[in-house]
Amino acid sequence: MSQALETDRTFYDRFPDEARVVRAALLSSFLALALGAFFGIVQTLHRTGVFRGLIDSTDYYTSLTAHGVFLALSFTTFFLVGLFTWAVVRSLDRPLVNIKITWTWYGLMAVGMTMTGVSILAGFTDAVDMSADVLFTFYAPLQAHPLFYAGLAVFILGSWIAGADWFRTFLAWRREHPDERIPLQTFMVLTTMTMWYIASSAVAASVLLFLLPWSLGLIEQVNPTLTRTLFWFFGHPVVYFWLMPAYLLWYTVLPTIAGGRLFSDPLARVVFVLFLLLSTPVGIHHQYLDPGIAEGFKFISMTNTMFLLLPSLLTAFTVVASVEYGARQRGGTGLLGWLTDLPWRKPEFAGMMLAGLMFAAGGFSGMVNAGMNINYLIHNTIWVPGHFHLTVGTAVALTFMAATYWIWPQITNKPIYSSQIGLFQVVLWFIGMALMSNAMHAQGILGVPRRTAEPEYANFEYPAMLGGFEELNVQIAIGGTLLFVSTVLFIGNVVLTMGNPRVSGLAESLSPALSGPDDAPLVLDRLRLWVSIAVVLVVLAYALPLAAIINRGGLLGPGVGTYPVWLAPALDALSAAATAIGGAVGETAAAIGGVVR
Amino acid sequence: MHIHDYEKLWLAVSLLLILSLIGTVTYGAVGPGVAMVADSEPTVDATALDEDERFAEPRVERVGENEYAAYVVAYQFAFQPDPLVVPANSTVTFYVTSRDVIHGFEVVGTNANTMVIPGEVAKLTVETDGPAEYGIVCNEYCGAGHHGMSGTLEVVSQSEYEGQNGGDGE
């Protein structure tokens, strides 16, 4: 990579305008993290029955919607746009084409998420006739307030303009450097955003063509299988959208922190191309248990999903090899002895390594999820959130927090307030998640459902295993509490860092790969080719299932009602009024009838 | 492009793992015959289930030698019929639909599990073991009262089942 590009000047010194955007995006991300973590601790204590005094069980779902949307959509995406802006500008060594456009997309994303956030939080009060208790999957025919869908549309539009901003900047660079290889970080950003355009087109279609018009009363009903399938068309690649910034950090920043170099630039490109090709034509694996979708489509999705393990398995090799190289450069020896020669006291290193370790565990529980028939045992049990708290909740979230300790000084010229707190915080996250996620997986095998305020039932008891339902609840509550404390320490550390004075001498450069871009076949950089193949694969995987779904139920579904979660008070008032009016009409009619008779 | 020998080995082992995983699922389908919930059933009008032949009166029905059909309706926030009573050591096919929003239908502690989508009918066939009582839970969020949505599956001995259903000549 671009060793020569960075001397002793930080990103803040070199690109102050872009650094401001990166800071704004990261701070938005941390605000979402703080909100999401607050709802997380409320839910952990409520669900396990430790403390149910703060909210009613009916409000649990408002909290769960907020937790999902703020963390899975807002925290992740704002961090991504900040990191990608940094990565593009840094690796191309040139400013963005037009910073006004950059602020425009940031503004759209912030406004969109605020709209959606307000519609969700309004669910806590009866004073406003607004609610969006539909969880982050918003399955129709449960219906949220129109503001919820409109906000999502604006948020996604902002992310599209962000991608266009980076593509334009890349094209400007290309005109200045016609014969150079695409720098690795920019390559990663462009492939990830291409995947995002393909994936988010489906959810945008679902929101704009069906859900938003339906919530505004313009169409009477929607086809629940169709909107659900369009959601998962987007919903699986979105997990890679969360993960790709973490991969970018593992490939391009972690080796340097370890004192080494990336093992192979060409294989890193291969991995990102594989994700572009395979992330989308797999979404139906979230619908293995859906009626109305043929078994053959589920089987195709299953095989694609299994092949999606390949880029992650390759990543495991490359990242470990790069770190081992770093350890040996630092004097490490032996088969495993080199592990002791790594900078474990740096929170940015320890955090990313622990995140990677948990991602491996998450990968294994993911293989179970992907196994079409064994999936029946755990589908929609708490096993599933147990799984994704390892992937997005740790591989992604812990990597982002750890990376903040490294990148924040680069974009602010302010040293981190306390590395010790940072180290304690990342280790605490690992311990908390080990407890919580393990117990969630175990409860899932017992059959305990996900997404419920009160998982204990009066009419039956769960089968006992190693550790029964109650013991596992205690583990979940302790784990969740540690995670909350860890988040508070992270946010506190960032806030205190913001109070530090600016200093010089914080610049860190990134070391070039051992096997550099010149070893990569040129075909890897031919983005048009990969986009074409990706689109063909998506069409192959989705054209027939979508056609079959529309053929079965129609664009707007077989007879299906509408169940607004936000109109209940208004509907009650309306039906009371209707009864009164009906009664009055009846009485009048009777009176008239009496008169006539 | 240079690829390290260890990396080639890792790649080969990874591909082997992937093919084995696909192999186990394929074996499950063609060997023991684990069938997926699929699109075998026609769609229904969720807003007019009370006019539907199968779902107007949710029930368990004998359909063959030791074979039973259970027609189940899920709605905010219960299952019908409740309890579901089926005979032990028999083959039971569940037909589950919803008259309002998306629900789940999970027999706790077993792999009898399906999504319940309004307009669609989920069909899944199970072999019952000896007499036992199982919980049924809705495992998809379906509204503010979701956590109260559960039911019971009673697997009773053949004779007890006959006794309960003796009057209808089966």
Image (cartoon, coloured by chain):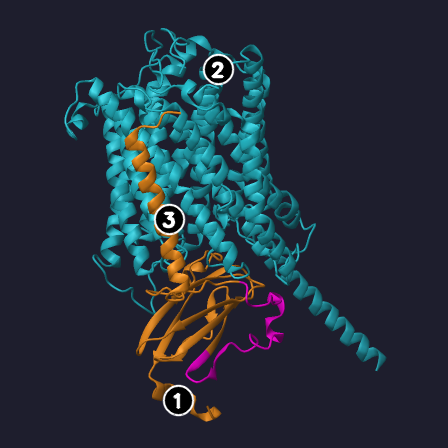
Chain colours: A cyan, B orange
On the image, numbered disc 2 is attached to which residue? A92
Regarding mark 2 in the picture, which secondary structure is present there?
helix
Q: Chain of mark 2?
A: A
Q: Write the start and end of the magenta stretch as one range.
A: B39-68
Q: Is residue A58 left or right of residue A389?
A: right
* Pointers 3 and 2 within a single chain: no
Q: Nearer the viewer, residue A113 or A314?
A: A314
Q: Residue furthest right?
A: A596
For the N terminus of chain A, which image quadrant?
top left
Q: Which residue is mark 3?
A: B19
- Which quadrant of the view contains residue A347? top left
- The first of marks 3 and 1 along the sequence is 3
Depth check, front residue: A493 or A397: A397
Q: Is residue A282 above or below residue A552?
A: above
Instruction: Find out whether residue B57 is within the magenta segment.
Output: yes
For the residues carrying marks 2 and 1, which lies nearer the camera in this image?
Answer: 2
Q: Chain of mark 1?
A: B
The residue located at (58%, 41%) in the rendering is A536
Q: Tag on residue B162?
A: 1
Name the residue at 28% across, 41% down.
A433
* Left or right relative to A441: residue A90: right
Of A524 and A160, the residue lying toward us: A524
Q: Does residue A130 appear in the picture of this structure? A: no
**Quarter assignment of residue A32:** top left
How much space separates mark 2 and mark 1, taking CA atoms? Answer: 78 Å
